[in-house]
């Protein structure tokens, strides 16, 4: 049972009490038959739904393409949509091929910390790095690219792995009055999880739409990611919880 389901299960009074200390989202949910309705100050963030991360791509996430119809269905509920693209240089430091003797899914110590090494993927300007062709987001306002500094990875759409260099997304969202973000896309346990946690750190209310995400799940990374997102105060919901 998800965090959201459990709250619903414990009943109206308890749920209202629980919500009153938080962002008030449960109040909003009650206003419309237990659904969460994104308002003018909410943004959908669609993380890395690119050819590289679906079947036939260079770093395929199992069932990655299944997020596309879910995202297409909920997107019309949002006035604000941001799309991200993993956008690496050739020979990027996150590629195993850039480190002699290393294989994909090994890890290596870089200046900023441990880095998981990946197959070459999402190289700038390639078809592999293009957005999935069936993604229908005609109203999206911003495409933000990340991971373009050759020596530094960036799972997060907000801040690179050096935990210093920002992408500008925080400033963009705040300048536009966004208070709540709904995170979707690929992969749950890497770019979605880091983006969701950084959004919390930046002060946003954060929902992660579980069925609009798929995971890589490397050595227990999926369970660890949900635990970390929960601890950070990200709320897990399903696409059917949205109105
Ligand atoms: C991602 C691994 C490497 C992601 C990006 O989008 O989750 N994962 N680069
Ligand atoms: Zn990457």
Image: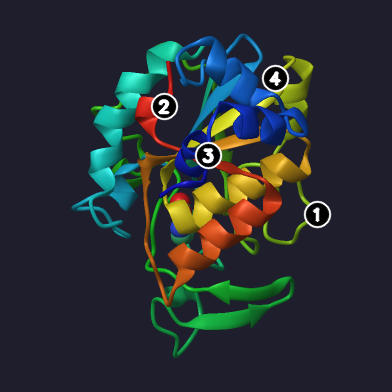
Image quadrant where residue 220 sits? bottom left
Q: Is 57 rendered above or below residue 180? A: below
Residue 136 appears in view: no
Labels 2, 1: front one: 2
Q: Residues within 10 Å of mark 4 (few under 14, many from 20)?
A: some
Tell me if 55 is positioned left or right of 104 in this view: left
Q: Residues within 10 Å of mark 3 (few under 14, many from 20)?
A: few
Tell me if 205 is positioned left or right of 135 in this view: right
Labels 1, 3: front one: 3
Across and down, in percent, residue 112 comes to: 73, 71
Q: Is 28 rendered above or below residue 196? A: above
Q: CA distance from mark 1 to mark 3?
A: 41 Å
Check mark 3 vs ligand 1: CB closer than 8 Å? yes or no.
no
Q: Earlier in the sequence, mark 2 or mark 4?
A: 4
The answer to the question of whether label 4 and label 1 lie on touching residues, with beta carbons closer than 8 A, is no
Give the residue number, with chain letter if any, for mark 4.
Answer: 178
Question: In what quadrant of the picture does the C terminus appear?
Answer: top left
Q: Which mark is residue 164?
A: 1
Q: Earlier in the sequence, mark 2 or mark 3?
A: 3
Q: CA distance from mark 2 to mark 3?
A: 17 Å
Q: CA distance from mark 2 to mark 1?
A: 35 Å
Q: CA distance from mark 2 to mark 4?
A: 20 Å
Q: Is 19 rendered above or below residue 216? A: above
Q: Earlier in the sequence, mark 4 or mark 3?
A: 3
Across and down, in percent, residue 51 comes to: 29, 44
Give the residue number, with chain letter if any, for mark 2.
Answer: 241
């Amino acid at each position: 049972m998800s965090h959201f389901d459990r709250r619903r299960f414990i009943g109206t009074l308890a749920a209202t009490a629980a919500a009153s200390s938080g962002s008030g989202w449960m109040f909003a949910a009650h206003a419309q038959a237990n659904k969460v309705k994104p308002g003018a100050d909410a943004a959908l963030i669609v993380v890395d739904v690119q050819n590289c991360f679906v079947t036939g791509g260079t770093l395929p996430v199992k069932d990655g393409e299944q997020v596309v119809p879910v995202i297409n269905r909920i997107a019309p509920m949002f006035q604000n949509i941001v799309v991200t693209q993993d956008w690496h240089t050739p020979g990027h430091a996150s590629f195993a091929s850039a480190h002699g003797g290393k294989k994909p899914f090994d890890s290596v110590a870089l200046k900023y910390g441990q880095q998981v090494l990946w197959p070459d993927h999402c190289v700038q300007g390639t078809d592999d790095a293009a957005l999935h062709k069936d993604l229908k987001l005609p109203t999206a306002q911003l495409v933000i690219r990340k991971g373009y500094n050759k020596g530094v990875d960036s799972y997060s759409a907000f801040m690179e792995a050096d935990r210093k260099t920002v992408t500008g997304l925080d400033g963009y969202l705040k300048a536009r009055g966004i208070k709540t973000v709904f995170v979707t896309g690929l992969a749950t346990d890497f770019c979605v999880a880091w983006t969701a946690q950084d959004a919390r750190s930046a002060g946003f209310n954060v929902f992660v739409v579980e069925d609009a995400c798929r995971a890589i799940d490397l050595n227990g990374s999926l369970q660890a990611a949900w635990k970390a997102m929960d601890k950070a105060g990200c709320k897990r919901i399903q696409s059917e919880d949205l109105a």
